[in-house]
Image: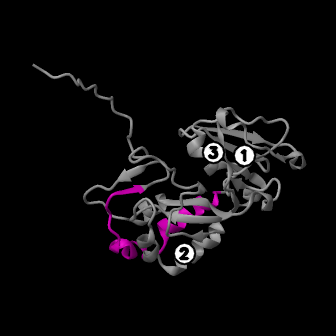
Amino acid sequence: MNSSPIEKARKLVRSFPDLANKLETLEAEGTYYNGKASVYFDDDEKVTPTLLAECLSYYIDIDEQELPEEKIPLGRSKMKGLPHLPPSLEWPKKHYFYAQLNIAEFKKYDIENVFPDSGMIYIFDNASDDFTVLYYDGPMDVLRPVPYPPAKSLPEPEYFLEEYRDSTSLLSFSPRFIFYVAGDAYDYRAVTAALPADLVKALENILSAKISDWNPSLRIFGRPLFWQGEDEEGFGDGDDEDFDDEDEG
């Protein structure tokens, strides 16, 4: 069985000549992301080629271009504004429209074949961090912009309706890869600067993607976005302690 481009890239990182010496300048502090969880460095741990390979992640960057609603073609990927829904799908009750993603627009960057070949993903937000996701795989020529439901049917419309309804962006996609080590939640310039140019070029050829030194908030794949600490290794494994708030004595 042929290995995936990501595995080929990680194999190259592990075996690249003299890479260990190049990585000695990196500070092994805080956490790194190994593809499953954020892990704290041990006191004497270093950034090695093996660890660096674990921290290699591929993602699809999402770029926003703010446009008037009428300027966004029917069926294109977009954020906020009005959804382009087929007759077979209903607007989820008590939700705002967040985004629609036309899979055909980014499928060519899905190098591990996670998504189907086509279809539309709709994301609706109830403004309380709960989302409803719908999938439609029918013909796109039946899609129509659907106006917002009455304000009184939405949660706290005085705070959210204008934000979700009256601003909209066209979305576009591009492939990227990044090393989640020797940085904070967003800034990974240190590790990128330490990499040999010929290694970066080889990785870009394998992954058909450009390297990134900044972790964007809007993307597909890559390091999941969590509240502080929720993605750390072992989070939630221990039993919660019960605390008695009553005064003793």
State the SS at label 3.
helix
Q: Is residue 78 magenta?
A: no
Residue type at mark 2?
Answer: Val
Residue underneath mark 3? 161
The local secondary structure at tag 2 comes to: helix
Q: Nearer the viewer, residue 86 or 49?
A: 86
Q: Which residue is mark 2?
A: 200
The quarter holding residue 172 reads bottom right
**Secondary structure state at the residue bearing disc 1:** strand
Label 1: few (<14), some (14–19) or many (≥20) C-alpha neighbours in 10 Å? some
Marks 2 and 1, how far apart in space? Answer: 33 Å
Query: Residue at horizontal 83%, vertical 41%?
Result: 86
Image coordinates of residue 165 in percent, x first then y, are 68, 49
Q: Residues within 10 Å of mark 2 (few under 14, many from 20)?
A: some
Under mark 1, the amino acid is: Ile
By secondary structure, the bulk of the magenta-drawn segment is best described as helix
The part of the image, by quadrant, that contains residue 175 is: bottom right
Q: Is residue 89 left or right of residue 34?
A: right
Q: Is residue 148 left or right of residue 95?
A: right
Residue nearest the viewer, comparing 98 with 223: 98
Tell me which segment is drawn in magenta: 3-32
The tag on residue 121 is 1
- Of labels 2 and 3, the one closer to you: 3
Looking at the image, is 44 positioned above or below residue 232? Answer: below
In this orientation, which residue lies closer to the viewer: 73 or 116?
Answer: 73
Q: Earlier in the sequence, mark 2 or mark 3?
A: 3
Residue 96 shown left or right of residue 225 in the figure: right
The reply to whether discs 2 and 3 touch (Cβ–Cβ < 8 Å) is no
Query: Which quadrant: the C terminus?
Result: top left
Residue at the far left in the pictured view: 249
Find out whether residue 8 is within the magenta segment.
Answer: yes
Give the class, few, some or many, for how many residues have Cα within 10 Å of label 3's Cα (few <14, many ≥20): some
